[in-house]
Image (tube, helix red, strand yellow):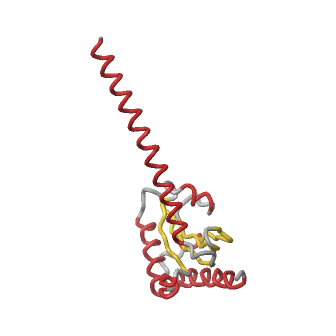
Amino acid sequence: MEKWKKIIKNFLLAFVLISIGFALGKNFAQNERNETVGAFSHENKKSVSVFYFHSSFRCVSCNSIELKTKAFLDSYYKDYMDEGIIKFTSEDFQKNETLAGELDVYGSGVIIALYQGNKILESRKLDEVWTLLDKPVDFDSYLKTNINEFFKLREENT
């Protein structure tokens, strides 16, 4: 009986220590993400961020949308990306709950956001990327139209 008490006590102690470790790790990762978002800003200048949000489990379509979006930006907006006017990032909305909440994200997809420093001025979810996945010309046109609208907003608010 004494042996079982010792085993249970050690098991519970290990469980508590592991739980504390996970809690600290999650908090550290979130703080690191917040610092990264701050590093993206250019003082108080306006920028357009294109996010691909996904879940921890990713299907073929999810991966394809991310790759096509990134390739599109690299092809058509490379200079703007190099200057930091457009930023692309892929985020797990289940792990980055803070950013997902700020952008009202509950599932996988492409989001465009207009930032001034770290403040979101406007955002839009591009739901049609799913139906345009097998239509590359329409997919690119849809992205281009929406990104250009955000460029106009960026200029209007300057």
Which is nearer the eye, 8 or 66?
A: 8
**Residue depicted at x 62% and y 63%:** 103
Residue 91 image offset from top left, x and y in percent: 49, 63
Question: Which residue shows up at 46% across the image and 77% down it?
Answer: 70
Q: Position of residue 82 (x, y in %)?
A: 47, 84
**Quadrant showing the C terminus:** bottom right
The residue lying at 57 percent from left, 56 percent from top is: 98
Residue 80 in the image: above or below residue 62: below
Q: Nearer the viewer, residue 54 or 156?
A: 156
Please give the name of the residue rendered at 58% of the width and 81% of the height, measured from the top-left corner.
142
Residue farthest to the left?
Answer: 3
Percent position (x, y) of residue 73?
Answer: 49, 82
Q: Residue 8 is drawn in which quadrant?
A: top left
**Residue 59 against residue 25 in the figure, above or below:** below
Q: Nearer the viewer, residue 86 or 94?
A: 86
Of residues 133 and 85, the one nearer the viewer is 85
The location of residue 63, given as percent across then percent down, is 42, 68
User: Where is the N terminus found, in terms of image quarters?
Assistant: top left
Q: Residue furthest right?
A: 156
Position of residue 144 relative to residue 51, above or below, is below
